[in-house]
Image (cartoon, rainbow, N blue to C red):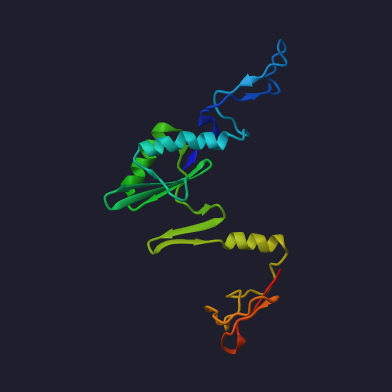
Amino acid sequence: MDVKIVFLNGIVNEEIYVSQPPGFEDHKYPKYLYKLKKALYGLKQAPHQWYERLSPFLLSHEHERGNVEKTLFIKKAGTNIILVQIYVDDIVFGSSNAKLCDHFVKAMQGELEMSMMGKLSFFLGLQVKQSKEGIFVCQSKYCKDILKKFEMEACKGATTPMSTNCYLGVCTDQVIGSDDVSCACPSGACSVEHVG
């Protein structure tokens, strides 16, 4: 779901003045400034004002704000749940019940001008594939873009980018106080060098 003219929906709660934009100068008062009533694109407060506009709306519709991720909103209805993630002007949502999604869309479109983008397939560098077997997330496009950027497309791939025969475990016999910290793992397979 995409919010149209998202930052113009944010209400400004403080006094913000901007210079007269080109084409809108008042020749009688060229030194006057405009006082904003609503947020504008490019205004550093705009994303915050937009979030402050949307957040109370979601909370008033029985969504709870996430404890760790404050832009994640959760609503439980019996055994069903709907998750709503806000990212600037994009809203990603999913539910265990299609009716919760329909209700959410109707409420949002009643409050703001929104457009539905369809099923999520790409978001923040993540590719998302939805099927009856489940939801699968990968970053292959992102990885390919990085390889292309650094001209490493022809490099040899590895299924596991680390040694597979190294035993990793809790070290109980360490030598402390020297430049090297060593471990007494079986056959010395795990040695740790102090870098500093």
For the question of whether residue 77 can be seen, the reply is: yes
Furthest toward the left, the residue is: 78
| Residue 35 figure quarter | top right
- Please state the horizontal and vertical placement of residue 135, each as a whole percent of the image: 43, 60
On screen, residue 90 above or below 136: above
Which residue shows up at 56% across the image and 26% down it? 14
Looking at the picture, tell me which residue is in the foreground, 28 or 123.
28
- Mark count: 0
Which residue shows up at 49% across the image and 54% down it? 121
Looking at the picture, tell me which residue is in the foreground, 169 or 174.
174
Which quadrant would the C terminus be assigned to in this image? Answer: bottom right
- Please state the horizontal and vertical placement of residue 85, each as a whole percent of the image: 46, 47
Furthest toward the front, the residue is: 177
- Please state the horizontal and vertical placement of residue 28, each as a whole percent of the image: 71, 10
Q: Is residue 62 left or right of residue 167?
A: left
On screen, residue 14 above or below 74: above
Q: Is residue 161 left or right of residue 84?
A: right
| Residue 159 figure quarter | bottom right
For the question of whether residue 6 can be seen, the reply is: no
Which residue shows up at 50% across the image and 31% down it? 9
- Please state the horizontal and vertical placement of residue 124, each as a whole percent of the image: 55, 52
